[in-house]
Amino acid sequence: EHTRFAIELTNPSGLFVDECGTAYTANARGTNDGTIQKIVNASDPKGIVLAGGLKEPTDVTLDRYGNVYFVERGESRIQRINARDGTVETVVDKQGVLVFGTQYWNDPRNVAFDSKHNLYVADFKNFRVQKFLFEGGDLFC
């Protein structure tokens, strides 16, 4: 038996479910109309759009502080939605650097954290996974 979310999504490509059962989705939609949505429960008819007007968002995850991180594939960057105020900012840019380096990404697709709060990004066409160390454990809070 399965339960279907009441929400209709267009091209969902990334999914993260937190410990409370809240689902976060990356929805590619059209070229410039992707969204990151929060679905609190299965009876939620629309969900909450946390970010819109995105170019091909492909994956989403949360850090231990409740900040939402997502891959905006069409812009080759990792974005963060601040848990406190909802602002969206670039965390890792097109060069695939946090603070250092010059290598460009070629089709970033997936993002995840490990238990030590290190960020991992799958760089599809460069055939690699990059690890970013957040010195001191909490770079953004």
Image: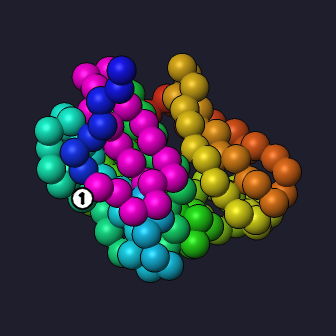
Q: Secondary structure at mark 1?
A: strand
Left or right position of 11 against 122: left
Q: Along the line of sight, which residue is nearer the eye, 128 or 99?
A: 128
In the rendered view of the protein, which quadrant contains the C terminus? top left
Magenta extent: 8-26
- Residue 87 position within the rendered picture, expressed as x and y whole percent measured from the top left: 27, 60
- Farthest residue, direction right: 127
Report which quarter residue 53 is drawn in: bottom left
Report which quarter residue 23 is drawn in: top left
Disc 1 target residue: 49
Whether the magenta-drawn stretch holds residue 72 is answered as no
Left or right position of 60 against 127: left
In the rendered view of the protein, which quadrant contains the N terminus? top left
Whether the magenta-drawn stretch holds residue 25 is answered as yes
- Residue 119 position within the rendered picture, expressed as x and y whole percent measured from the top left: 59, 38
Can residue 126 be seen in the rendering of this structure? yes
| Residue at the image point whose x is 54% and y is 20% from the top | 115
- Residue 7 position within the rendered picture, expressed as x and y whole percent measured from the top left: 24, 50
Image height of 122 relative to 102, above or below = above
| Residue at the image point whose x is 20% and y is 50% from the top | 47
Left or right position of 124 against 4: right
Can residue 91 be seen in the rendering of this structure? no
Colour scheme in the image? rainbow
Q: Along the line of sight, which residue is nearer the eye, 28 or 100?
A: 28
Q: Residues within 10 Å of mark 1 (few under 14, many from 20)?
A: few
Image height of 60 relative to 2, above or below = below
| Amino acid type at image mark 1 | Val
| Residue at the image point whose x is 35% and y is 57% from the top | 9
